[in-house]
């Protein structure tokens, strides 16, 4: 199996499956485009909110620095101790003799956005200070007072209530500003809600569930709607495929959309016209066959009154041909009669039954994988005519059976003289015979092909390279 065959099998075949696939692709495209647009707008909104929150935080930091700078030196530590004893404020503030080293959190776009905004505001508000450092740290690695003291070593009332928020563990923004030589003001704070974390915003579980439920129910309702709308179309297709085998099936119920109703109505009208045509044709041939008997008999009697024996013989010969043609026409109509129910046919049993009349003349190779649905008597006539011709002109017939899923193939190979290629199409016409030394009317292959056509199949001829004729009968399986 090549790649094209593999992908063609994966491609949906029914209208319902194709419509559902188109719906899923449309939903995926719409949700994808909508999701990208929403994500872009949401990210813009979040960034604007984060910048505004950072701006406010930076302004508060600058105000705090200005406040402590305005205090006399002897009061600064007193104020810090009071703040710690009261449980802290929005910021953890300390005055250190050195800049404290930090272990920063992993770099990210949102982290850099906050730092850029805070640094810009601080430099605008604290223009006389050159040494301004900001960064984010975690509560576990945050150092305070000096490079040897961790926040986790302090009493909980000093900093934990201000800088920790279990179980989120948000990053802590640390700002260090040198306000005098060997005097650094140290401020640590959390970002305000809802921007405490630096993670990029993502689709929430509630949004994902809502998206899944919307897609599921939309697909479910669409499936039931399409299934209801395509059911009359499926019935119409089945009835059309069965029309050749069962012209007298009940009319289809007109249902569905207006287009399907019109198609069903046209199909029912066509079926009625075909029934009338077949019935008129049968009646015509029966009438012709019956009406010709009287003048033919009358002409025979009158021919006997002639005195010229040679002329009598010629008259009788012409009348015999005329009678044979009338009987042959009636036989063609009868043997391609469609007034027969479709049944499951065991082809091997049918072939064995036909071959009993030709002992030692027919061999069979292969066997069908399943029963064939068709008209038993019609199929028997078809097979019988092909085998009879093969035995008559080729002495021995070898039948090969190849049953695929869509089509049942039967190959009939004989050892006769074959048929010239320019005559192979004409041989199916009524009364066409290549060998006039054998008995027959030249109707067998034509009747066989008509039966094959009635079952949706065909008969083709080909000369074998080693001699003889190969007849291929194709009979598609009908669901």
Image (cartoon, rainbow, N blue to C red):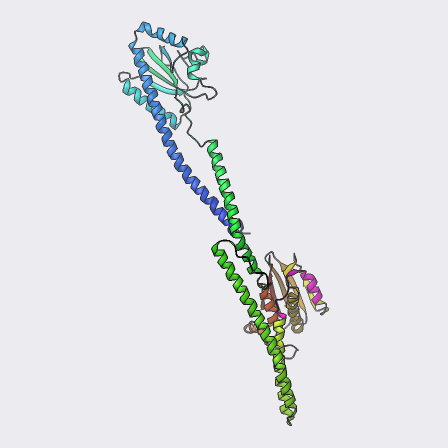
Residue 162 at x, y percent in the picture = 41, 15
Nearer the observer, 237 or 283:
283
- Image spot of residue 448 (x, y percent): 61, 69
Residue occupying the point 46% across, 31% down: 204
The number of numbered badges drawn on the structure is 0
Position above or below: 118 against 350: above
Q: Is residue 369 left or right of residue 24?
A: right
Visible in this render: residue 14? no
Q: Which of 453 and 127 is in front in this view?
A: 453
Residue stretch rendered in magenta on the structure: 335-354
Q: Which image quadrant for residue 429?
A: bottom right
Q: Which residue is at a point 65% across and 70% down the rendered structure image?
A: 385
Horizontal relation, residue 7 to residue 91: left or right: right
Residue 194 versus residue 256: which sits nearer the camera? 256
In the image, residue 345 lies at what x, y percent? 66, 61
Percent of width and height locating residue 365:
67, 61
Q: Considering only vertical position in the picture, is 428 above or below 373?
A: below
Q: Residue at x 26, y 18 (%)?
A: 127
Residue furthest out toward the left: 128
Q: Does the magenta stretch include residue 338?
A: yes
- Left or right placement of residue 215 versus residue 329 in this view: left
Vertical placement of 237 versus 57: above or below? Answer: below
Residue that extends furthest to the bottom in the rendered view of this protein: 307
Q: Tell me what residue is drawn at x 48 percent, y 35 percent.
A: 210
């Amino acid at each position: 199996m090549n790649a094209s065959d593999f992908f063609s099998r994966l491609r949906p075949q029914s209208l319902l499956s194709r419509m559902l696939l188109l719906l899923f692709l449309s939903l995926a495209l719409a949700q994808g485009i909508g999701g990208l647009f929403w994500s872009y707008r949401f990210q813009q909104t979040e960034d604007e909110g984060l910048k505004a929150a950072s701006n406010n935080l930076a302004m508060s930091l600058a105000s705090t620095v200005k406040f402590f700078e305005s205090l006399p030196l002897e009061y600064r530590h007193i104020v810090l101790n009071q703040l710690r004893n009261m449980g802290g404020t929005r910021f953890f503030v300390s005055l250190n003799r050195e800049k404290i080293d930090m272990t920063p959190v992993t770099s990210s776009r949102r982290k850099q956005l906050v730092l850029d905004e805070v640094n810009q505001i601080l430099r605008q508000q604290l223009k006389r200070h050159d040494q301004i450092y900001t960064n984010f740290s975690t509560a576990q690695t945050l150092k305070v007072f000096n490079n040897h003291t961790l926040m986790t070593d302090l009493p909980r009332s000093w900093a934990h209530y201000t800088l920790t928020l279990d179980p989120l563990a948000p990053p802590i923004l640390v700002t260090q500003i040198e306000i005098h030589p060997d005097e650094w003001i140290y401020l640590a704070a959390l970002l305000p809600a809802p921007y405490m974390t630096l993670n990029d915003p993502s689709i929430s579980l509630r949004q994902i569930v809502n998206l899944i439920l919307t897609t599921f129910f939309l697909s479910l309702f669409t499936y039931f709607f399409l299934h209801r709308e395509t059911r009359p179309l499926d019935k119409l297709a089945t009835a059309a495929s069965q029309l050749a085998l069962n012209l007298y099936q009940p009319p289809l119920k007109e249902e569905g959309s207006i287009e399907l109703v019109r198609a069903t109505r046209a199909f029912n009208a066509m079926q009625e016209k075909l029934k009338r045509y077949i019935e008129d044709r049968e009646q015509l041939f029966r009438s012709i066959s019956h009406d010709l008997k009287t003048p033919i008999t009358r002409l025979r009697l009158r021919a006997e009154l002639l005195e010229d024996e040679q002329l009598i013989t010629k008259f009788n010969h012409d009348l015999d041909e005329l009678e044979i043609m009338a009987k042959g026409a009636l036989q063609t109509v009868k043997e391609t009669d469609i007034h027969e129910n479709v049944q499951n046919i065991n082809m091997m049993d049918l072939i064995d039954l036909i071959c009993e009349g030709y002992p030692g003349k027919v061999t069979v190779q292969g066997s069908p994988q399943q029963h064939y649905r068709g008209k038993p008597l019609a199929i028997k006539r078809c097979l019988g005519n092909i085998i009879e011709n093969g035995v008559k002109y080729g002495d021995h017939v070898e039948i090969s059976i190849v049953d695929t899923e869509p089509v049942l193939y039967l190959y009939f190979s004989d050892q006769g003289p074959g048929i010239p290629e320019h005559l192979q199409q004409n041989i199916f016409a009524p009364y066409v015979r290549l060998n006039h030394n054998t008995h027959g009317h030249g109707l067998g292959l034509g009747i066989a092909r008509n039966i094959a056509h009635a079952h949706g199949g065909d008969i083709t001829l080909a000369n074998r390279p080693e001699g003889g004729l190969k007849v291929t009968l194709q009979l598609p399986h009908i669901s």
